[in-house]
Amino acid sequence: MSKNCNVCGYKKPDWRFKRKPDGSRKKTCKSCDRTWKNDILRMMVRDRRLTPMERLSSRVGYMGVAFLISGQWTVEPILFMIGFCCVLIQVTVRRQWNLVVLQLNGLIAWTIHFINSL
């Protein structure tokens, strides 16, 4: 039995196609599926699912970045402080300790600025 590859378009025997986990055959032949470019891209991608805590912290981090951007436009210390707190949650959950220190530095600096402006 043979079928056409969806990349190169050549008709090839069935054994030239990989099997999926469910047992069915893929539509791309092995020679088209394994190129040096695809190998490099596969090595760069981390194949895992995020936990609910990581997903929530990622969304809080995006919200924090929005506060930081709005703080840039309005120069309001409160927006900067909220933004740094939100991003601090994200980098703490991801255990990126160098960024935790950086966010704490920004949070302390804007808190001092806010207190001095009162």
Image (cartoon, grey):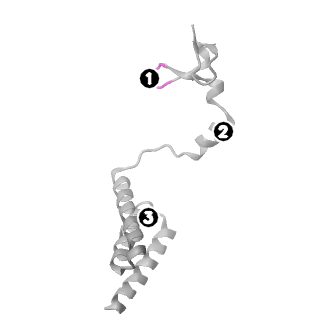
Numbered disc in front, either 3 or 2: 2
- In the drawing, does residue 88 fall left or right of residue 34? left
Among the 4 quarters of the image, the one containing residue 116? bottom left
Q: CA distance from mark 3 to mark 2?
A: 31 Å
Determine which residue is flagged by label 2. Answer: 37
Q: Which mark is residue 91?
A: 3
Q: CA distance from mark 1 to mark 2?
A: 26 Å
Name the N-terminal-most of marks 3 and 2.
Answer: 2
- In the drawing, does residue 33 fall left or right of residue 114? right
Residue 32 position in % (x across, y down) = 64, 27
Q: Residues within 10 Å of mark 1 (few under 14, many from 20)?
A: few
Q: Measuring 46% from the left and 44% from the top, which residue is drawn there?
A: 48
Instruction: Give amino acid for label 1.
Output: Asp
Residue 55 position in % (x across, y down) = 36, 53
Tell me the SS state at disc 2: helix
Residue 51 position in % (x across, y down) = 37, 50
Tell me the SS state at disc 1: loop
Q: Which mark is residue 22?
A: 1
